[in-house]
Amino acid sequence: MLYVPGDKPRAMDKARTLGADAVILDLEDAVAPEHKAAARENVREALRTPWPCPVLVRVNGTGTPWEHEDREMALLAGVHGLVLPKVEDAATVRDLHLRVPLWAMIETPAGVLNAAAIAAAPGVAGLLVGANDLARALRCRPHPERLPLLHALESVVLAARAHGKHPVDAVFNDVRDAAGFARECVQGRTLGFGGKTVIHPAQVPAANEAFGVSDEEAQAARDLLAAWTAARAEGKSVATFAGALVEQMHADEAQDIVNLWEATRPRA
């Protein structure tokens, strides 16, 4: 999910071509207060023409001078969803009565502690980690493996998965460090995140690779499913594939892999 500042029309135009699974047009942190109104009009204009992927708008948070105008513009423009920053409790989400899916940003200690209730709230599509604000609130120090944040990160994954919502990992700040970004993507997928928010076009391909499915992985999943189908046709409750025991759980996981591979293939 690619963040694009709302005060940069050329960047928004380029974002259409970058292959992100979703684009988040940002009216919040990426836009200085004196540029908020202009950015809102830029986003309104950008939403007038179709996009090749879902488009979300990160509005300014509750209690800010811009919150109502941001939400009204985005809803009237027909966005696929709203990203709400610094969500700390489920009541905040319920009180909005939105007509589009909401992606709640978890970026405060209270948000982490209430992540399960937020994920369970009607209308919430997923949880996005805001690690920069969270680290500042926790007063933790930077670490290459994000050790001070691991509990919070896994809490977000647990909350989202428990309620069938999408957990999306935080941004990686150093756009020059491609190797560090790739490592953090692998870590995020290992923790259970379904994707990553990114802030630079160069990060999109690496994120797609890390959170996607390779042709080899897809073929292995299809082979496992074939072995499972053959075993079930013979009346067996389990199968053996590549020397490992296969049960229904493994077949379901293989089907998920195939489904993701198919969903991310380029369309003709």
Image: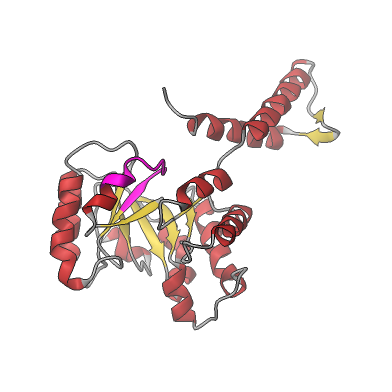
Query: In the rendering, at what x and y percent does residue 224 appear?
Result: 73, 28
Residue placed furthest toward the right: 243
- Residue 4 versus residue 143 in the image, above or below: above
Q: Nearer the viewer, residue 171 or 128?
A: 171
Residue at 25%, 45% (x, y): give it: 79
Q: For residue 80: magenta?
A: no
Q: Nearer the viewer, residue 92 or 264?
A: 264
Q: Quadrant of the C terminus?
A: top left
Query: In the rendering, at what x and y percent does residue 215 appear?
Result: 62, 31
Query: In the rendering, at what x and y percent does residue 180 appear?
Result: 58, 62
Residue at 45%, 51% (x, y): give it: 202
Q: Give residue 38's quadrant in the image.
A: bottom left
* Residue 65 visible in this rendered orientation of the protein: no
Residue at 80%, 23% (x, y): give it: 236
- Residue 160 versus residue 267 in the image, above or below: below
Residue placed furthest toward the top: 233
Q: Is 145 situated left or right of 1 in this image?
A: right
Which region is colored magenta? Answer: 13-24
Query: In the rendering, at what x and y percent does residue 57 appear?
Result: 27, 53
Q: Nearer the viewer, residue 261 or 12?
A: 12
Q: Nearer the viewer, residue 181 or 61?
A: 181
Query: Which color scheme did the rendering employ for the protein?
Result: secondary structure
* Residue 14 visible in this rendered orientation of the protein: yes
